[in-house]
Image (cartoon, rainbow, N blue to C red):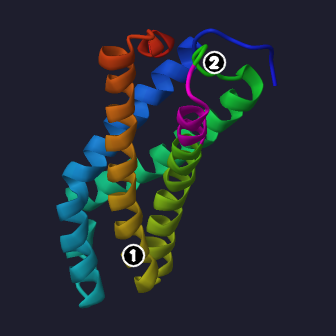
Amino acid sequence: MSAAVERYSRAQVVLHWATLALLLVSFISHEGMKDAWRALRQGGEAAAAGLGSQVHVWVGVAVLALTLIRLVLRVTQGAPQPVAGQSPLLTVASSIVHGLLYLVLLAIPATGIAAWFGGITDLGEVHEVLFNLALLLVAGHIGAALFHQFVLKDRLLARMR
């Protein structure tokens, strides 16, 4: 890993926000995917080829690709050190949440791909549960960032500009 950095690289910042945008598109397109999944399970393959399902599938593939690139950049370019004077509990919580976010950002598309292309129905259910877990993690991540910005006032958000 590279030396300590004070902020994330431009590429890391762009990929961070691009991933969030793709997750929003995925959320918006999930109803079309659910309809296509039901149609496919009932033997209606033509109905499964709708725009909503296609957007959802390709957005998922993009999330997987961006997450893999983000992990490579995190290893090669590093990440900022914890905020000076930060509680060790916050540092551990931050590491856990970041690790879980990366894990679900890999597992969500992997389970979706296996369900859609492999026809593994149970993984479709796992996919949906993982997405709900991701929503909770993202909400906690946003809440923590806002806590740092407005309560602790430690300029943590400046790392992601």
Q: Amino acid at mark 1?
A: Gly
Q: Residue furthest bottom?
A: 42
Label 1 vs 2, first from the N-terminus: 2
Q: Amino acid at mark 2?
A: Pro
Mark seen at residue 61 = none
User: Where's residue 161, x and y in %?
Assistant: 44, 10
Compared with residue 13, is residue 36 higher up or lower down, i.e. above or below?
A: below
Q: Quadrant of residue 151?
A: top left
Answer few, some or many: residues within 10 Å of disc 2's Cα (few below 14, many 20 plus, some between 14 and 19): some
Compared with residue 16, is residue 157 higher up or lower down, i.e. above or below?
A: above
Closer-to-camera residue (158/92): 92
Label 1 belongs to which residue?
124
> Which stretch appears magenta?
86-95
User: Where's residue 111, x and y in %?
Assistant: 49, 68
Side (left or right) of 4 relative to 131:
right
Label 2 belongs to which residue?
80
Which element type, helix, strand or loop, lies under badge 1? helix
Closer-to-camera residue (150/125): 150
User: Where's residue 117, x and y in %?
Assistant: 47, 73
